[in-house]
Image: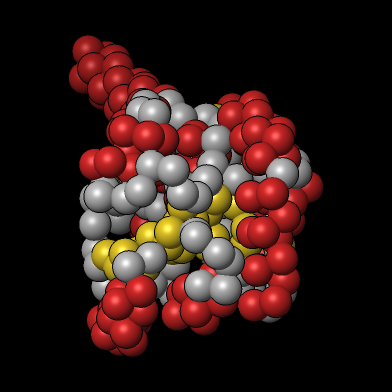
Amino acid sequence: MCTHAVPCSLIAEQKRRGNCEVPLAAIVTDFDVHSYWAHPNVDLYLVANAQSRKTLEARGVPGHKIQICGIPIRPDFEKKISQKTARKKLGLDPSKPVVLVMGGSRGMGGIENAVKALLEVKQVQILASVGLNEDAMEHLKVHKKSGRVHVYGFTENISLMMDAADLLVSKPGGISSSEALAKGLPMILINPIPGQEERNARYLLGHACAVMAKNSEELVDKVENFLENPQSIGKISQKMLKISMPHAARDAAREVLGILKRQKQRLYASQSAD
């Protein structure tokens, strides 16, 4: 099971050469599929949406090898607790708005600048998840004195933090975006990495599930506009839930088990014939 195109293509090539007989599943964790994924010796593609399926078919992948499952996320994102309860668990003021700032497991995407800008928004509480970015953790310590900034390193509490938040400020990684979709948490996109994340951004913007902030001033304006018009948050949340696929991991597992079952059946039939 490969979630990155490079190892997928390497294993597929070994299958083509007859050096590997293990079934190969490609799990695309973005909302679009680039050309590196397409290889005739991949046994199963698990993709995020119908457009990704069309893209692979256009590159010669047979339709029967492609299943639309969504992007796999952890089961805890399938559930949601009340915003008030989540804020209390995190030690936040339940009556004041919360903005979650993320940059993936590596804490990329200009988290420090985003937090600094958001401090201009009155009363907003900021959850900053910097992942493994120790430099960002160190630089953000100065803002903790305000009592409005809560900084987290690598954490498994993202589901709880999303439940507590009104808005998510993040680069458009495929997995974090899928987690937000499952929660119905409106996104303000910043600093997409060129390539796949730019395409992720186009997908989210095209479905009106997010807005883009090109700089700190735009970020502050968009956050203030959202918080002043809570009905707009509700409208985007509904659109996100409509296209979300929170059971993607379970559906993907079922498809992978399916190709293993079919391989065993083929092996059994071959042995019986011998």
Does residue 255 show up?
Answer: no
The image shows residue 245 at horizontal and vertical percentages of: 52, 30
Where 48 falls versus 78 (above or below)? Answer: below
The image shows residue 256 at horizontal and vertical percentages of: 36, 30
- Taking depth in this image into account, of 15 and 110 the one nearest to the observer is 110
Question: For the view shown, which residue lies furthest in the right direction?
Answer: 206
Q: Residue 133's image quarter?
A: bottom left
* Residue at 50% in and 79% down: 116
Does residue 251 show up?
Answer: yes
Where 149 falls versus 172 (above or below)? Answer: below
* Residue at 70% in and 76% down: 217
Left or right: residue 255 compared with residue 188: left
**Image quadrant containing the C terminus:** top left
Colour logic: secondary structure
Left or right: residue 71 compared with residue 31: left
Left or right: residue 72 compared with residue 20: right
* Residue at 71% in and 35% down: 231
The image shows residue 131 at horizontal and vertical percentages of: 30, 67
How many marks on residues? 0
- Taking depth in this image into account, of 48 and 43 the one nearest to the observer is 48
The image shows residue 77 at horizontal and vertical percentages of: 37, 35
- Taking depth in this image into account, of 159 and 36 the one nearest to the observer is 159
Left or right: residue 125 compared with residue 213: left
- Taking depth in this image into account, of 198 and 48 the one nearest to the observer is 198
* Residue at 49% in and 34% down: 182
